[in-house]
Amino acid sequence: MRTTIILSVCVLLVASPASALEYDWLACGHVHLAAENDKPSPPRQFVPSRLVDVLHFKLDVTPNFRARTVAGRATVTFKTIGKTPSRPEARPGRPQRTRGDGQSRDQGV
């Protein structure tokens, strides 16, 4: 009986380091394979800061099929977020009209 206990202890002592070494070898092998397949990740992209919060966007489009033209009007209702930039053409409380070609601006419609 004493021989059986001694034999069991010897087997456990020999088997434990072997399994630990085998685990280390497998773990290192997997890490090595994972490092080869890694691709550089693209840089993070963030949404630009908004100056306004759009509350409502109304688009009125009127096509003229005979003249083959389209007329439209867009109305945007928004609320400022944080500090508003100072722009001389935008006056508080006054509507602003802009043509689609960006050439003319009428204030106080």
Image (tube, grey):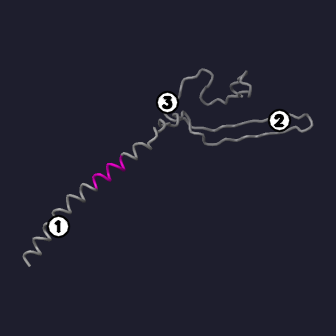
Q: Nearer the viewer, mark 1 or mark 3?
A: 1
| Image-based side of 56 in relation to 25, left or right | right
Span colored in magenta:
23-31
Q: Nearer the viewer, mark 1 or mark 2?
A: 1
Q: Is residue 1 above or below residue 32?
A: below
The outermost residue toward the right is 66
Front position in the image: 16 or 76: 16
Res. 38 mark: none
How far is disc 1 from disc 2 in space, using C-alphas? 90 Å
3 vs 2, front mark: 2
Q: Circle 2: is it few (<14), some (14-19), or many (20+) Cα within 10 Å? A: few
**Which residue bears the numbered disc 3?**
83
Disc assigned to residue 11: 1
Residue identified by numbered label 2: 70
Q: Position of residue 35 (x, y in %)?
A: 39, 43
- The amino acid marked with disc number 2 is Val
> How much space separates mark 3 and mark 2, taking CA atoms?
37 Å
Characterize the magenta stretch by its predominant secondary structure.
helix
Q: Residue at x 82, y 39 (%)?
A: 62
Q: Quadrant of residue 77?
A: top right
Asked if labels 3 and 1 touch by Cβ distance under 8 angstroms, the answer is: no
User: Mark 1: which secondary structure?
Assistant: helix
Residue 62 shown in magenta: no
Pointer 3: residues within 10 angstroms few (<14), some, or many (20+)?
Answer: few
| Of pointers 1 and 3, the one earlier in the residue sequence | 1
Task: Please state which amino acid type lies under the numbered disc 1.
Answer: Val
